[in-house]
Image: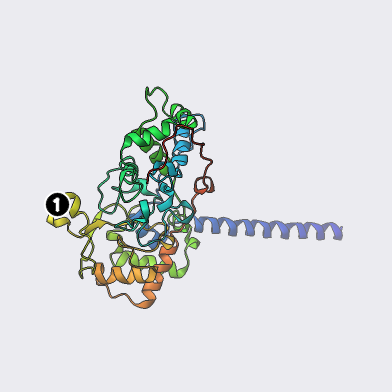
Amino acid sequence: MRARRLIFFVFLVFLVLLVACNRRQTDSRQSQAGPPAELIVQARAAFGLGELPARPVPGPDTPLGRRIRLGHRLFFEPRLSASETISCNSCHNLATAGVDNRTTSLGHNFQAGARNAPTVLHAAVQTAQFWDGRAPDLEAQAKGPVLNPKEMAMPHPVLVVARLKSIPAYRRFFQESFPGDPDPVSFDNMAQAIADFERQLVTYSAFDRYLQGDESALSDQAKRGLRVFLTKGCAGCHNGPTVGGTRFAKMGVVRPYENTTDEGRFAVTHDAADRFVFKAPLLRNVERTYPYFHDGSVWTLAEAVETMDEHQLGANLSRPDVDAVVAFLRSLTGEVPAEWRTMPELPSSAPDTPRPLP
């Protein structure tokens, strides 16, 4: 009898402990699922809830799926250049966050470009393309470098199309990607395929997890940097899901910028108010997209933050604040999907494919 009572007592104690443990776990989950921290709320107001455009996942046998894969090939295709040595990926290397990490890129016959090559990652979300916004969308942007005499230097769209049409595999790829088009291999369709591919180039970071409520995704220093970024006015230009790329701003609001040779958007609009105005760059993956600014003059994040403070804000940031902002900016780093940053197999030229130009 005593043994039975002892067993019953032990069992009762076990049940009490089990209920208490479950209650603590429930309370913990409820606490974790409670209202987000004030800083997260402020960040969501400036940047959204990690609301990056979702990557479409089209089936490989759909027209969109085929266009994306055609665009992947064309992005890496050097035969879109006069010399057959330069591709989109030459200046927007997907293995290095969509840039070439040069002050300015080298184009046809090693000519240096006038501006730093911005990242192609998240480019689809921007308000316009190029530093001066002269292209309204990705399709227009894709055409520009191909015909620019200092970049890929193709003399005319007709020659671009002639090269593509001369390659049997490309004729098939274009027909499959643009069904119903009586002339699928065209300059416009080339740009459309590249643009559809570039819309896949979305990365996700620790900051996205933080915006979605994971307070542990950022270090304490990065959270301090985020608070400085918000309170000192950085988010006035660098806002939205891509932390920038959504508006134009004058370079040199508080103090004139030293480089006055590039007048920015003024060359496009011829409006005096647009002199030294540039698109505020998106800051996702900024840790890897050095050197910085339209002239590629700054090579470290800390110096970039100090330069913005001096010329745009006049906030007199302390060194600890600068370091904290840098920590926050590093939380914006993500990874390009391996399937897109890897060079695809390109089809062989045919005997009648036009040869490289000098």
Residue at 54% from the left image edge and 41% from the top image edge: 345
Residue at 59% from the left image edge and 57% from the top image edge: 25
Please tell me which residue lies in front, 292 or 3.
Answer: 292
| Residue 198 in the image, given as x and y percentages of width and height | 41, 44
* Quadrant including the N terminus: bottom right
Residue at 43% from the left image edge and 48% from the top image edge: 85
| Residue 82 in the image, given as x and y percentages of width and height | 37, 44
The residue to which callout 1 is attached is 270
| Residue 63 in the image, given as x and y percentages of width and height | 45, 29
Near mark 1 (Cα within 10 A), the count class, few <14, some 14-19 or many ≥20, is: few
Q: Does residue 199 appear anywhere in the picture?
A: no
Please tell me which residue lies in front, 43 or 3.
Answer: 43
Q: Which scheme is used to colour this image of the protein?
A: rainbow
Residue at 14% from the left image edge and 57% from the top image edge: 273
Answer above or below: position of 203 versus 54. below
Secondary structure under tag 1 reads loop
Write down the quadrant of residue 99 in the picture: bottom left
Amino acid type of disc 1?
Answer: His
State how many labels appear. 1
Answer above or below: position of 88 versus 20. above
Q: Does residue 251 appear anywhere in the picture?
A: yes
> Would residue 38 appear left or right of 169 to someone viewing this image?
left
| Residue 96 in the image, given as x and y percentages of width and height | 46, 56
Answer above or below: position of 112 versus 342. below
Instruction: Spot the residue most to the left.
Output: 272
> Would residue 76 appear left or right of 14 to someone viewing this image?
left
